[in-house]
């Protein structure tokens, strides 16, 4: 048992993702604005963040900053599957967002269904889930861009997965793991044909109802012992 535990990598030894680097860079930018770092110190640390390979190497650059001790930077890594569970998401879309030589967006406080289709043809589509209400744990976004642009933003406490590609275009999904195992998982699937599809977290935005569910689960557990 002890040998097995020793074989498991610690969080600090895990390879750093682009989302991890963005998180540290945001903390450094705030520290610069607050006067905790000089411009030279900020530039030196940002350069180190870009070259860091592991989570542990990244945390070195913020260990003397208050944000490193507020519980937000020590993330647990979830086990969200790369694809949604079979039958969990219907093939029909709950909503379509289409932009043809135009602009279309879905943002603010809105209810996210299980499946959303976004199509951009010589247009621009923005899907912002940072303030959305997640009624389902798994959400699928099918994004197809032809000579267009599709931007997808999610809260930083959900998991984000992507499957797709580009044909003379850019299809980029920043893989994200939620610290809460019950957090929603957003799957982005699609193609960019001479266009752009990009999905990433919006820093500082959290799904409030996740915190509510966690508190209810804790309260329920406490009641069992009363």
Image (spheres, helix red, strand yellow):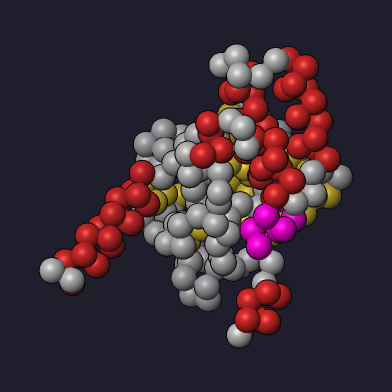
Residue 13 covered by magenta stretch: yes
| Residue drawn where x is 70% and y is 35% of the image | 61
- Taking the image as shown, residue 159 lies to the left or right of residue 43, namely left
Is residue 57 something that shows in the picture?
yes
Q: Confirm whether residue 119 shows in the render.
A: no
- Who's the residue at 71% across and 58% down the image? 14
Q: Residue at x 68, y 74 (%)?
A: 6
Q: Residue 147 lies in what quarter of the image?
A: top right
In which quadrant will I find the N terminus?
bottom right
Rendered residue at 53%/31% (across/down): 66
Quadrant of the image for the C terminus?
bottom left
Residue 186 appears in which quarter of the rendering? bottom right
The image shows residue 131 at horizontal and vertical percentages of: 42, 38
- Which stretch appears magenta? 10-18
Tell me the quarter of the picture where residue 102 sits.
top right
Q: Nearer the viewer, residue 115 or 83?
A: 83
Instruction: Report the front residue among 5 and 18.
Output: 5
Q: Would you place residue 141 above or below residue 26 in this image?
A: below
Q: Is residue 71 left or right of residue 153?
A: left
Q: Position of residue 16 (x, y in %)?
A: 72, 50
Toward the right, the furthest residue is 168
Residue 46 rendering spot, x and y as whole percentages: 76, 29
The residue positioned farthest toward the bottom in the image shown: 1
Query: Across the whole image, how many numbered discs are drawn on residues?
Result: 0
x, y (%) of residue 161?
Answer: 62, 57
Is residue 37 found inside the magenta-colored segment of the image? no
126 above or below 157? Answer: above
Horizontal relation, residue 1 to residue 178: left or right? right
Q: Is residue 51 above or below residue 139?
A: above
């Amino acid at each position: 048992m002890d040998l097995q535990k020793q074989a498991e990598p610690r969080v600090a030894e895990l390879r750093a993702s682009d989302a991890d680097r963005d998180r540290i860079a945001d903390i450094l930018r705030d520290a610069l604005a607050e006067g905790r770092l000089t411009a030279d110190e900020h530039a030196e640390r940002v350069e180190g963040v870009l070259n860091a390979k592991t989570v542990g190497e990244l945390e070195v650059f913020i260990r003397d900053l208050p944000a490193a001790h507020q519980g937000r930077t020590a993330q647990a890594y979830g086990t969200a599957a790369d694809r949604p569970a079979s039958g969990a998401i219907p093939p029909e879309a709950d909503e379509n967002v289409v932009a043809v030589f135009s602009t279309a967006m879905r943002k603010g406080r809105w209810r996210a269904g299980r499946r959303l289709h976004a199509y951009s043809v010589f247009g621009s589509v923005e899907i912002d889930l940072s303030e959305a209400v997640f009624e389902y744990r798994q959400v699928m976004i099918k994004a197809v861009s032809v000579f267009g642009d599709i931007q997808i933003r999610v809260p930083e406490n959900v998991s984000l997965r992507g499957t797709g590609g580009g044909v003379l275009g850019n299809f980029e999904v920043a893989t994200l793991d939620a610290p809460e195992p019950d957090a929603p998982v957003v799957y982005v699937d699609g193609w960019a044909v001479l266009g752009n599809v990009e999905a990433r977290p919006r820093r500082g935005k959290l799904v409030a109802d996740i915190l509510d569910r966690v508190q209810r689960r804790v309260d329920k557990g406490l009641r069992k012992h009363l």
